[in-house]
Amino acid sequence: MTDLDPLGPLVTLADIDAAATRIAGRIHRTPMHSATALGERVGVRLALKAELFQKTGSFKVRGVFNKVLSLSPEERARGFVSCSAGNHAAALAFVAAAVGVPATIVMPAAAARTKIDATRGYGGEVVLTEGSVLAVAREIEQDRRMTFVHPFDDLAVIAGHATLGLEILADVEDVDVVLVPVGGGGLISGAAAAIKLRRPVTRVIGVEPVTADVMTQSLAAGKPLHIAYPKTIADGLAAPFTGEHNLRHVRAFVDEIVRVTDDDIARALGLIMQRCKLAAEPSGAAAYAALLSKAATVPEKACVVCVVSGGNVDPAVLKQIL
Amino acid sequence: MVTALEPPTLDEIRAARGRIAGEVLRTPLVRLNVDGPTEIYLKLENLQAIGSFKLRGAANAMARASDAQLAHGVYTASAGNMAQGVAWCARRRGVACSVVVPDTAPEAKLSAITRLGAAIHKVPFAEWWNVLVTRQHPRFDGQLFVHPVSDRAVIAGNGTIGLEIAEDMPDADAVVIPYGGGGLTTGIATALRALHPKARIFAAEPETAAPLAASLAAGSPQEVAYTPSFVDGIGSTGLLAEMWPVVRRLVDGSLVLPLEAIAAAVRLLVERSRVVAEGAGATPVAAALSGKAGTGKIVCVVSGGNIDSAKLAKILQGGLP
């Protein structure tokens, strides 16, 4: 990988507003869920951005819809190919069906059964591989002349995800801190851009599993890295690499990346289910895990939003956590 | 001779809405993603701060009370969701709260009440039941009593759910409501009958404890066999006498569901809708899925989400707790 070009492009407020207009009506505007009891436990005023109620059960449709609707009719007509361990796969299959074209998604053979089934359920073709999902997806792009829709390293995808940041600011005008889970870095790239461009005093903190910390490592290295396949309970955050666009956005807009253990995530998920009745997936509980574990330090009584990014959980995993 | 409860008027329900607006969530109405001829919508009261609709009634009853009435504290008689509702509202107001519970109440429920800062007063079951009937307990003389079910202000608070359903789904074909004491059913049905008389209104009960269905069939209040189950928020051996004359003219029927169907609905709500519902809250969903509530647009009131974690784990595994 080459060193990061710090002068590369960043999404603008105009891009983000255009994305919001483009995808309006295609996605849900998800509710902000006040979580008083969970907030008291960590000494803050807390609200949860309940993105697990988004179509397909995660934020991913925001970016994918914006990308797909930004393409030329010719690019769209060729159908889509991508790689993903789960939520992007389901989102791409869903969006492709919505615009009436086929989608092929390369998934790791070890991907959660429920996520493979969901992707097929939305009409997507699933290709399983033990090797590099990205490499196989790029081959299919060439062989079948399909349009590649990157799961996170794409400006249109980032601008689409940024609409989640706009909604947070609209619902919690005085928000002091926003915590966002980090996998490949697509969601935080967009959400942080929207928040910092609109309200620079709000702190944006990214949260990674300690065993899947490609963003932390890439920031230290100054370039986007590939790491060995990470293992974490938060399967949605187990991205083995991040992208140039993502690293650039994180550098420009994110105040800090912190790390949490699987135990922290499990404890946070248990509380979110028991107290808020939200059946989140482990990735969606990572942001609150950073508050519980004190990996993220926030001022007493601060107004905090944690993004609950998705709810596509294997019931067997939930059973263990409960 | 029991005097029938006089249900609140639509104006009282509207007034309740204004009173509780800052304290209570206007819960979302979301579509349940299932195939078939029926469109099922979920009124997610499990997302209220205490995990159940009971906050609405508690908030309205306490908002109507004067500072002088609240000065000596409040109390209720409940081992479940109403205790949490009253405790939550009392804590927000800085008012002392006591909860009379039967000595059979499970520890898990009691710890949720003490966590909200309320004091527990354990009494034998018969003494506890007597508080519900007489609406007082000598130990708490001078304090405001909030009845968990048959209180006009509480029912008016519950009725605000009906106002929201009428706004969000003006063309609903049916609304299904879990039947416990009858306070939730009466509140919602009163609002809907006034605003949206075409919608059919069904109560829903577990087959292990379904006195309303038996009473409607017989035309008079009936005692039934009662088997305790994971559906612990509703179901009883009989009806509260003052509710029967009101409820019988408000509902189109009571739908009775087997425990297996209710457990399956709890599981489906986690998998498809990403919410945790307790057995009572999932009972209307089981009713809608069974076809018993008819076809078209059916609104299910998911009344609460306070389910024991071990029981939820068992259900997610495909079992019956």
Image (cartoon, coloured by chain):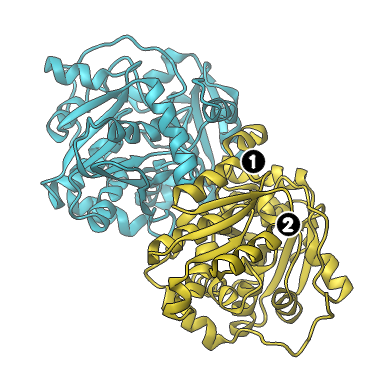
The residue lying toward the viewer, choosing from A60 and A40, is A60
Disc 1 residue crowd, few under 14, some 14–19, many 20+, Cα 10 Å: many
Image quadrant assignment for residue B189: top left
> Which chain is tinted yellow?
A
Q: Residue at x 65, y 66 (%)?
A: A138
Mark 2 or mark 1, which has the lower sequence index? 2
Residue A170 position within the rendered picture, expressed as x and y whole percent measured from the top left: 49, 74
Q: Amino acid at mark 1?
A: Gly
Q: Residue at x 83, y 74 (%)?
A: A1
Q: Residue at x 65, y 64 (%)?
A: A139
Local SS, label 1: helix
Q: Is residue B14 left or right of residue A318?
A: left
Question: Mark 1, chain letter?
Answer: A
Judging depth in this view, the residue of A185 and A77 nearest the camera is A77
**According to the image, label 2 marks what residue?**
A132
State the residue position of label 1.
A270
* Chain letter, cyan: B
> Which label belongs to residue B26?
none
**Vertical order, B127 against A245 (above or below):** above
- Can I make out residue B170 in this image? yes
